[in-house]
Image (spheres, coloured by chain):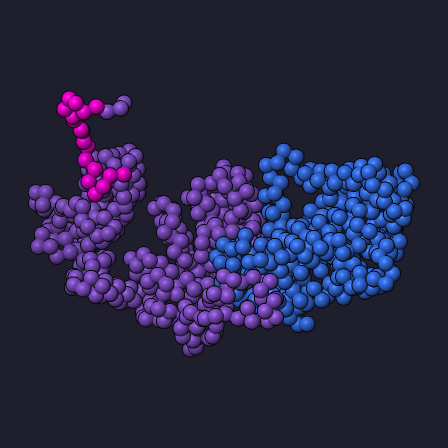
Chain colours: A blue, B purple
Amino acid sequence: MSRVWSTLQRAWRQRALVLALARRELLARYRGGVLGFFWSLLNPLLLLLVYATVFRLVFTPRADVRPYALFLFAGVLCWGFVSSALLDAAETFRTNGPLLRKTTVAPEVFPAVATGARFAHLVLALPVLAGAIAIGALDGSVRPDAAVLQFPVVLVLLAAMVLGLALVVSSLSVHFGDVRDLLANVLTLTFFLTPILYPIESAPRRLRLLFWLNPFAPFFVAVHESAFFFRPVPAIAWAGMIVWTFLALAAGAAVFERLRDSIAEEA
Amino acid sequence: MTPPPAAIDVQSLTKLYRRWGKKRSIGTFKSALLSGRPGRALAPDEAIPALTDVSFTVAPGETVGIVGPNGSGKSTLLKVLAGILRPTAGSVSVRGRLAALLELGAGFHPEISGRENIEINGLLLGLSRKEIARRFDEIVRFAELEEFLDAPVKTYSSGMAVRLGFSIAAHSDPDVLLVDEVLAVGDEAFSRRSLEKFAEFERAGKTLLFVSHDLGLIAERCHRAIWLDGGRVAADAPAGEAVTLYRESVAAREAARRAQPRSAPAAGRPRRVGSGAATLAAVRLLDSAGRETVRLRSGEAARLVMEVEAPEPLDDFVFGFAISTVAGATVFGSNTAIDGFVPSGLEAPSTVALDIPSLELAPGVYSVDAAIHARDGSPYDYRRDVLRFEVAAEHPTAGVWSPDRRWSFSEGIRWKT
């Protein structure tokens, strides 16, 4: 407990550096592109258009999740954040080896930067989501209300959980060469087992408990409730999110502290 | 009176590097999980000592050099002091704000501008955003990068990147500065300016610890030097003494290796000797335009100047210059006696200049000795390695002499034009 706390404290003291490095990541990515930050909007926009086209013209979704493009969009954006942040974290120590070996920077900064930069991507895509909701509201297919205010809280909890997992995968990746490949596989499987493409209610009743045991399930239930159905997020989902976030941070701090000494030596 | 608390206190420091050996090459997470004991795969196979039972303290305001052969643990010591590596045993404490210059520009990102890199590098060195903003202009001025501030760092020459890296670190205002062999990079003019910056630190009462293979620099700049050998402290003494001990050991080792006795290297001699009846206030190298320089082109005109001071008028004096390679081979040496001048009177301050119409040296770095001595050779002021300069040429040639030259060929030899 105190270890989790001190790791978080250390990370907090480095927040200016984390912010600056995350900003650098974003700037370096968009610098030189003609459209600059507009790219960050274009990609989700295209994704949304493809969903809208395919699920209107090709594939008929269930009646309870229409417009399906919008249902899918919120979840896929959030999952994009989870998977890209974790994959970045799995190679961040290798990418930043010179910094680790040659400067006094605290190593926990790097998984935090991977999470922060990808979270910023997610936030930059939110205007597209907001626009899509607004269009849906105009033609009456969704009715946004104050329940949407839960969405930012859900995102913050999701980011904290991802930070915990990022600490785990980044420190393990220093010792094991295959963490990133393994992670990519696990993420693909998890994507389909998590209620992102479907509402959790469509899981068969006898298996539903199993679905709820997936750590990501409460987060995506909450994403759908707050940003698609505009209903209060159920208490069980809140409880799940808080418990999993805490466990992820505790595991992250524990694994990181265990391997911390060897990071600057091995990276 | 109790002494002030040490700026750096190292007690029985031992650092082992852990090696994961064979396990690491197989080292996959899958096999670790399948083995059923993932924790075991994280345990090291063997430990290699990098530092063994190292103890020393450095008082505030002291400048201490670390010398020793490659692999003796110098860089590891700095990294442990900087907090990058943790001691395996023993303790290390540093009082005050610490800045470590282990590699200039280590934190630069090539795609973003110098401006943004200054901010990130400053944060890496532990400055706050406010402090960076306050020092920003000075950092840029010292690095002489005003025009390139908004260009991405990938467009900088390596010299520019080094200047910027040093400037940021130098302006981070540390109480304790750790420097690892960074003066070796950059041109002569820049390393001179960085040395001035170090002198400024020293005057401001900051503590400096630096690793260098430039023993002359250590002997000249440091109060004290620690000689590390095989991860242990072999000597901790006044800088000149420690450097001499180290040099002797290197020479002895070298002699043993070649299994034949060799005379002690010239480098073992002191850098400055003399009675002081006359002194060299300054020695300068000027180019053909009369500007002071440390970089010339092969074949260019050069002028060596010494400024002489003497407390009392003299009637017995000889001025001399010698140029040698940094490896120690003398390339040229002459003095006013050799060249036929018979002294009659000297009233200081005065200036002596030696003009060389065409500096026919091959590209490389050369060292200048300057001397004033009596006709019988007893030195008033003899300064070895008082100046270093670089000779550049379009094409490198072998050796040290690059004369003006012409080739001619008989008929029957043809060249593509």
- The structure residue drawn at horizontal position 79% and vertical position 50%, both measured from the top left corner, is A197
Towards the viewer: A181 or A67: A181
| Residue A86 visible in the current orientation | no
In the displayed structure image, the side of residue A107 where residue A149 appears, left or right: right
In the displayed structure image, the side of residue B291 where residue A115 appears, left or right: right
| Quadrant of the rendered image containing residue A11 | bottom right
| Quadrant of the rendered image containing residue B31 | bottom right
> Is B182 covered by the magenta stretch?
no
| Residue B379 visible in the current orientation | yes
- The structure residue drawn at horizontal position 63% and vertical position 48%, both measured from the top left corner, is A23
In the image, which residues are magenta?
Answer: B396-414
Towards the viewer: A161 or B217: A161
Towards the viewer: A99 or B122: A99
Residue A139 position (above or below residue A218): above
Q: Position of residue B36 (x, y in %)?
A: 61, 70
In the displayed structure image, the side of residue A236 where residue B378 appears, left or right: left
**Furthest-right residue in this view:** A140
Q: In which quarter of the image is the N terminus of chain B?
A: bottom left
Residue A78 position (above or below residue A3): above
- The structure residue drawn at horizontal position 29% and vertical position 67%, both measured from the top left corner, is B242
Q: Quadrant of the C terminus of chain B?
A: top left
- The structure residue drawn at horizontal position 30% and vertical position 34%, both measured from the top left corner, is B394
> Is B401 covered by the magenta stretch?
yes
| Quadrant of the rendered image containing residue B390 | top left
Q: Position of residue B356 (x, y in %)?
A: 19, 37
Q: Where is residue B279 in the image (x, y as percent from the top left)?
A: 21, 53
Q: Position of residue B379 (x, y in %)?
A: 15, 56
Picture mark count: 0
| Predominant SS of the magenta segment | loop
